[in-house]
Image: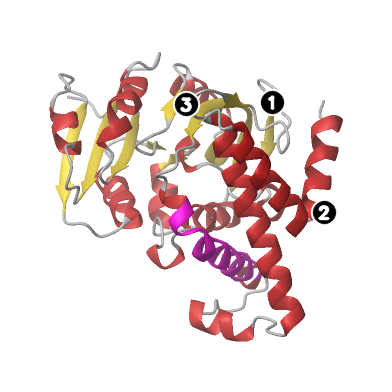
């Protein structure tokens, strides 16, 4: 039997609540020549049973001892039989034409090693188009600029398997900023494109791990940026401990980082509360976000009203 064209990697850890919906969205793709590797990273819930219940020969369940998200993703990359790897997290939803659209772009642009796309956000009651941050333009492409575009949603990744393997895949030490670290390293070895249309719906939920690791994510994001700039200058990367020691540590600098991080956290929670229909709670967190970093809100408002 010939190898599939695309390998979809879905890392799973205690994801049974939304896993069926995610897998259904992938198995309902208009493009069908793929294998789906469900990597169960030591779940203690019914996640593996959800996967086993699927009667589709394209699905393969791989169970492993819990070792972290990056280890699960790298196992999927190592096991991939296809020349392309697409990623989906356990609770996000891929739109029906996602794989078809991304494959066509990559086939039309053989010089590109990876492709990402925009996304919408959704909760229990509402969806949000990201219009405060992104300008959607169906069918349009742009080249990824790490310092300008920031971290792209992992669940939109569509990359050449060889490229992911050549850079060593994801790095656990950069978790929970491992997505951005991977994207930065990809962009330094080849062309990475962004399709400026939403192909995935990103689920906002109160139980998301993002809230529990947010402070660490912000610090690791600053480390990712520092490592990227060092590589551009052919300088060795610092370890995380070394990076923390060389950061400006005066009171003003610490307060600045705290205010920016706090504002982003409250903005994120405000968005999640809005998407769930909890409007008063959303307003409260929005006010706190504005108070701690008013300049960020000003930039969002300008982008929103100047979008094309």
List x then y, in percent, for residue 175.
Answer: 43, 61
Residue pictured at 57% horizontal, 24% vertical: 127
Q: Is residue 107 visible?
A: no
**Residue in front for this viewpoint, 227 or 276:** 276
Closer to the observer: label 1 or label 3?
3
Whether residue 232 is in magenta: the answer is no
Dot label at residue 124: 3
Which region of the structure is painted magenta? Answer: 211-229
- In this rendering, is residue 269 above or below 182? above
Residue at screen point 46% across, 65% down: 174
Instruction: Tell me the residue that label 1 is attached to.
Output: 140
- Locate residue 4 relative to residue 124 in the image: left or right: left
Q: Which residue is mark 2?
A: 295
Residue count near mark 2 (Cα–Cα under 10 Å), binned few <14, some 14–19, many ≥20: few
Q: Nearer the viewer, residue 306 or 232?
A: 306
Label 3: how many Cα within 10 Å (few below 14, some 14–19, many 20+): some
């Amino acid at each position: 039997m010939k190898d599939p064209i695309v390998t979809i990697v879905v890392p799973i850890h205690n994801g049974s609540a939304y896993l069926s919906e995610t897998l259904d969205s992938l198995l309902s793709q208009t493009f069908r020549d793929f294998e789906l590797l469900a990597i169960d990273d030591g779940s203690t819930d019914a996640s593996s049973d959800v996967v086993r219940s699927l009667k589709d020969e394209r699905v393969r369940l791989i169970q492993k001892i819990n070792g972290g998200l990056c280890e699960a993703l790298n196992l999927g990359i190592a096991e991939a039989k296809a020349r392309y790897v697409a990623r989906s997290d356990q609770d996000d939803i891929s739109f029906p034409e996602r794989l078809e659209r991304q494959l066509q772009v990559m086939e039309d642009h053989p010089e590109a090693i990876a492709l990402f796309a925009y996304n919408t956000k959704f909760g229990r009651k509402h969806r949000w188009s990201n219009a405060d941050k992104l300008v959607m333009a169906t069918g349009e492409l742009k080249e990824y600029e790490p310092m300008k575009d920031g971290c792209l949603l992992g669940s939109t990744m569509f990359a050449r398997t060889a490229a992911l393997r050549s850079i060593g895949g994801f790095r656990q030490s950069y978790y929970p900023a491992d997505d951005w670290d991977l994207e930065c390293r990809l962009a330094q070895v080849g062309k990475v494109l962004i399709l400026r249309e939403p192909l995935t719906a990103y689920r906002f939920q109160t139980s998301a791990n993002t809230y529990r690791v947010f402070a660490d994510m912000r610090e690791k994001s600053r480390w990712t940026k520092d490592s990227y700039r060092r590589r551009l200058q052919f300088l060795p990367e610092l370890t995380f401990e070394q990076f923390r020691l060389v950061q400006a540590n005066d009171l003003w600098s610490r307060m600045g980082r705290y205010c920016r991080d706090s504002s982003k956290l409250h903005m994120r929670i405000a968005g999640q509360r809005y998407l769930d229909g909890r409007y008063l709670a959303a307003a409260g967190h929005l006010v706190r976000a504005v108070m701690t970093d008013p300049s960020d809100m000003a930039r969002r408002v300008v982008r929103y009203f100047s979008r094309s």
